[in-house]
Image (cartoon, rainbow, N blue to C red):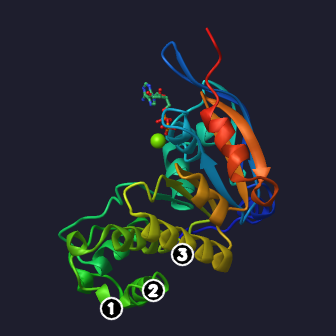
Amino acid sequence: MNVPGGDAADVGSRAQASLRLDGVGMSFGAKEVLAGIDLEVSPGQFVALVGPSGAGKSTLLRLLNGSHRPTVGTVSVLGTDPTKCSRRELQRLRTRIGFVFQQFGLVGRLSAMENVLMGALGSLRLPRYGVSSYPQDLRRRAAGNLERVGLIDARFQRCDTLSGGQQQRVAIARTLMQDAEIVLADEPVASLDPSSSLSVLETLRRLSAEDGFTVVCSLHQVDLALAISDRIVAVRDGSLVLDTATSQTNESQIRSIYQRNGPAT
Ligand SMILES: Nc1ncnc2c1ncn2[C@@H]1O[C@H](COP(=O)(O)OP(=O)(O)O)[C@@H](O)[C@H]1O
Ligand SMILES: [Mg+2]
């Protein structure tokens, strides 16, 4: 762990729900984007968040990492309400949450290794320049994490010369440097072709199973959600319309939720 101070509250939170939303609603001005959201995610669970574009998936993920404050209701992340945190506490909480983006968020001109090392910056005092400026133990860990995502041979390659799937693997390896307890992924494979999408998600799933971190991953593709998750939560027009164990649902049920028209006006 790179977070100092494993106090009693931290230990207790492992046994609690990783994430919990109670009666959460979110509006931007007069526009209501989420309403009446109740959701509890257990440690280690892999949740696929599905729903059409504009349904509210990204907003939900931002509530879960404390970037948005709900208009109503309460949010609990690892036993902590991010809206009640000081800036410093929120920063500490965020080091326990990894975030994976659709567009990877890498520095293209830097090597895979350097990008992964940047995942440890939260635990270092100063910005670093070049691989050799990082302590040796971190360099070893970064190489180990690149190995775990299948990219050790590409460690010195500039990220902007890697394929999309490889870039997302680097981003996942970077997140591993945080030893995060939760990984939130916002459409991490939306820019990838179907076969690299599946293999990137399978990698994320394997790492979650090996390390025990919780994942909430928004996805457009129902088939991928069915292939990799423990649980599927569907959002439509700002409401949860399905919350089920993946083994208890199927493609046609989920599709019918996607395709149903919104309320007639
Ligand atoms: N910062 C914002 N200000 C105003 N409206 C927003 C903001 N963020 C998202 N929205 C609106 O909220 C709705 C849900 O957006 P989003 O959470 O991005 O959906 P999804 O990720 O499922 O595509 C959309 O109608 C979007 O335009
Ligand atoms: Mg989105």
Q: Secondary structure at mark 2?
A: helix
> Where residue 182 appears, x then y in whole percent?
61, 61
Q: Secondary structure at mark 3?
A: helix
Spatial CA distance of label 2 from label 3 is 18 Å
Give the mark nearer the N terminus: 1 vs 3: 1
Give the mark nearer the N terminus: 2 vs 3: 2
Quadrant including the N terminus: bottom right
Q: Nearer the viewer, residue 23 or 34?
A: 34
Which mark is drawn over residue 203?
3
Amino acid type of the residue that numbered disc 3 sits on in the rendered structure: Thr
Inspect this view and state whether residue 123 appears: no
Which mark is drawn over residue 199?
none
Q: Secondary structure at mark 1?
A: helix
Vertical position of residue 52 compared to residue 121: above or below: above
Query: Cβ(mark 1) to ligand 2 < 8 Å?
Result: no
Location of mark 1 (residue):
153
Location of mark 2 (residue):
141
Amino acid type of the residue that numbered disc 1 sits on in the rendered structure: Asp
Inspect this view and state whether residue 168 appears: yes
Q: Is residue 157 left or right of residue 43?
A: left
**Which residue is most to the front?**
252
Residue at image position (60%, 30%) is 70
> Where residue 141 appears, x then y in whole percent?
45, 86
Residue at image position (48%, 37%) is 53
Query: Cβ(mark 3) to ligand 2 < 8 Å?
Result: no
- State which quadrant residue 194 falls in: bottom left
